[in-house]
Image (cartoon, coloured by chain):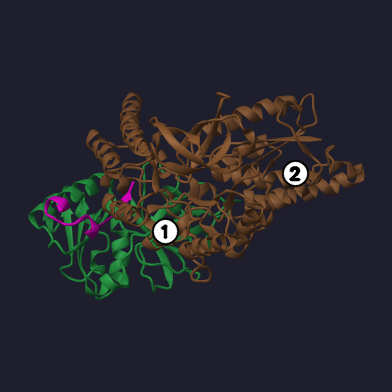
Amino acid sequence: MNIRGNIHKVVNIRDLTESTYVLRMEKKGLKFVAGQNLNIGIAGDTERRDYSIYSAENDDYLEILVKEVKDGLVSKRLRKLKAGEELDVDGPFGFFTIKEESRQAGKFLFIASGSGIAPFHSFARSYQKLDFKLIHGIRHSNEAYEREHYPEGQYVSCVTGDNNGDFKGRVTEYLRLNPPDNNTLCYLCGNVNMIYDAFDILKEKGLPSENLFAEVYF
Amino acid sequence: MKYHIVTLGCQMNMSDSERTRPVIERMGYTWTDNEEEADLLGILACSVRQKAIDKVYSRIHKWNKRKDRQNLLTFLTGCILPADKVKFMKLFDIVFPMSELKELPEMISQYGIVTPAGLQQTPETLVYHNEKLTELRQKTNELKLNEHIFDFWHINPEYTSHFEAFVPIQNGCDKFCSFCAVPYTRGREVSRPSKEILDEVQSLIDRNYKSITLLGQNVNSYGLDKNGNEIGFPELLRKIGEMGKKSGKEFWVYFTSPHPRDMTGEVIEVIAQYPNLAKQIHIPIQSGDDKVLIKMNRKYSVDDFRKIMKTIRTLLPEATVFTDIIVGFTGETDEHFENTRKIMDEFRFNMAYIAQYSVRPGSTSSRWEDDVPVHVKKQRFHTLTEDLMRVSFENNKKMIGRTYRVLVRGKERNQQFLAGLTEGKINVRIPSTDESLIGNIVNVKITTATEFSVAGEII
């Protein structure tokens, strides 16, 4: 037994696709700011991973969005947990958050690939009046995880593998065709290649680096 | 009975070792430089690089062989990854987090071996002791890494120098840089109570220490974990500055390492106000490319760093600036590397600790392919070192003809010279054999300069 954080019991697991699910656990008074992450392992296990919080600041539970990794030591085992089983949860950590002053007046573009949508889900659910647009890069349209949770017209899926998305192609292609205004605050989260490409496009379009915020998923 | 400790890694471990020694010595052990004659052997481990972990394995296998012919007790503490800890518990007699140092005498005494403490025991008590030992091991294993760090800070250190000292102010890290495993080995950021820090600094001032270094993984995050119930880093520095002013003594206070994200203008303003706060800043940039910084999860851009440098150069025009840089990080392209070369010229660092990227077990980046070939890393290391040498030489040449206060630290290998450091931590060679100067601050007029040092005459 090697406890690093606090024990939180699993409440339930909600499957989104064959390989992706939302794990809900007890909140136990843990306070966080949307965009932060938790370091999670199965109680008694040494293997741990960081996951962005998917739920809202005021929800009375905690949720994380997990994509199973091939040969992963944690993601596959988490999915097999049953309600009542214990997680060792440490955190919250991280600085991928929105300052209160910009939350009120700012205009936001959220750019995600795959499960990198998790912090944006937390932003959208925590700050109901936020002026944002979310573009989500996925391979298949069934990976538009819980798109009904976002206000109508603010979620754009960019799908490469089928024709059922809002946009056929990569996030970066969408970005080139629909660049944001230079005063937009751009938050990028997902795999590093997408972030690098999007970063270059946004810089080319004249966005200052102080308006760009990134969280790399690996 | 004799003991020996092997200390691996950074200044934090050196400082931890200064607190470990008195705990062991109070049990009746005496220090030996020769590990062959030690009855108690310990390692303060470092998990920053695999090489350091390999050293732990090599040492413990050697020591365990000696157990066939000698009554020997071994312990391991310091920075240990949870996964390594499980393996090490099978090899060492005692494994514990540094925060549990105060329990070490009890752990040793429960072993019932022939030690000054063990001599108190009878065979009848051994069954009880074995049970107690199991309980202690279990307890230590279940503890959070920083749970008892406050007890650790209460231990009076045995400083290894009579004029230079390290004072821990903070332990652990919440920054999660992708190349680093410290959050997993030392735990989360915990600040030491300011009263204890100020008391320790005051006692060093009273004993005429000349160089005091405030230590932590992220010193300028000091106090943030206390949510308003502790002073912040600028205020801590201000109080130390006031103590220096009141003492009227000449000494220099340094801090390492700060994180650029938490380096506020206020910190730099406070340093500018107090003569005892050394005009030397060590601020690790790690890369000069925004995209590499994103991948490193450093949480600042080159522009952010530029603003910090501008504040330093404006408020502290005489300050020297040191940095840390990693070359050959996973995915670093030639273009990324060229951006790092540019910042060497732009920021004109006095010193840069340049490291070729190597996988640090337990870090996030250890799960990625280490895709920059070794020969490329080496080439980048040499290229950047040459850039540094050029810039540093230009900086050092500007010192010629000027007189600096220099802390004499010891003799050089060439016995005809003394070695010292300026307030800005520039190495100074002094042609003198007068050992009585060691530990004193003297005036030195600089006459010559090389890439990494200057030389001059005492005046």
Q: Which mark is residue B272?
A: 1
Nearer to me, A153 or B296: B296
Q: Is residue A190 left or right of residue B318?
A: left
Can residue A170 be seen here? Answer: no
One can see residue B381 in this view: yes
The residues tagged by marks 2 and 1 sit, at their Cα atoms, a distance apart of: 41 Å
**Splitting the image into 4 quarters, where does residue B340 fall?**
top left
Label 1 secondary element: helix
Chain whose colour in the figure is green: A
Helix, strand or loop at label 2? It is: helix
- Which class describes the residues within 10 Å of circle 1: few (<14), some (14-19), or many (20+)? some
User: Which residue is more in the foreground, A65 or B178?
Assistant: B178
Q: Residue at x 55, y 34 (%)?
A: B53
Kindly identify which residue carries mark 2: B24
B212 displayed left or right of B103: left
Q: Which chain is brown?
A: B
Q: Earlier in the sequence, mark 2 or mark 1?
A: 2
Magenta run includes residue B298: no
Q: Are the residues under badges 2 and 1 in a single subunit?
A: yes
Q: Could you tell me which residue is drawn at 43 percent across and 73 percent down? A: A60
Quadrant in which residue B326 is drawn = top left
